[in-house]
Image: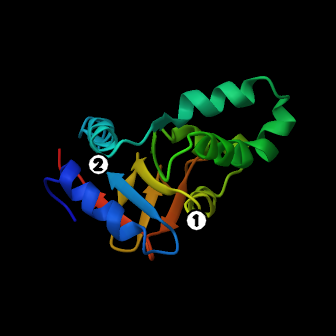
Amino acid sequence: MTGPIDAQHLEAQLASARELYARLIFVTGQRGSGKSRLLSETASRCNFPVLNVGERLAERLMGLPARQRAARAAPELDLLVQQAGSETVALDHIEVLFAAELQIDVGRVLRATSRNTTLLVAWPGEVSDAELSYATPDHPEYHHIPIEGVLVSSLSH
């Protein structure tokens, strides 16, 4: 869906996502489009936490030697979501997941984590008919993931 979406729309998607194998909803939009505000508003209305992934995951990985960060990043993200103690968790500021040094398959990790917890994710990249992408193919942080089997809502600026 493109155009104006609001917390009520996301609440309906949360209900639909509970029936999916990967209980995963992406909210896309350009920088400044209101993704963070919308996640916060929806989380407040539905009483679930919003995790600042960049901040929280960085805190967990900073104390590790660089060579261990790649191995620990995905399990630490999963642990952060579990420790939130909620059936639904919003993930904001996920750019750290794309860091080339962490070697994370972002789509696989988010799908796996969403098997146990419904995830509402602010996606900082682009969306097409078939996939979400982050950065350009020539960039070291480039990622693309298929959107088959997940829900996507796009904000207009």
- What is the number of the mark on residue 42? none
Q: Residue at x 27, y 35 (%)?
A: 37
Q: How far across and down, in percent of the image, does residue 109 sit?
A: 63, 58
Tell me which label, 1 or 2, sits earlier in the chain: 2
Using the rendered image of the protein, determine whether residue 152 is visible from the camera's viewpoint: no
Colouring scheme, one of rainbow, by chain, secondary structure, one colour: rainbow
Mark in front: 1 vs 2: 1
Q: Report the amino acid beneath label 2.
A: Gly
- What is the number of the mark on residue 115? 1
Say which of 122 and 19 sits in front. 19
Question: Quick check: 65 above or below 120?
Answer: above
Say which of 132 and 49 sits in front. 49
Q: Which residue is mark 2?
A: 29
Quadrant of res 126: bottom left
Secondary structure under the numbered disc 2 in the rendered image = loop
* Quadrant of the rendering where the N terminus is positioned: bottom left
Q: How far across and down, in percent of the image, does residue 95 sit?
A: 52, 40
Q: How far across and down, in percent of the image, does residue 98 sit?
A: 59, 45
Q: Report the amino acid beneath label 1.
A: Arg
| Marks 1 and 2, how far apart at CA | 25 Å
Quadrant of res 90: top left
Q: How far across and down, in percent of the image, does residue 92 sit?
A: 44, 39
Q: Does 2 sit left or right of 127 as displayed?
A: left
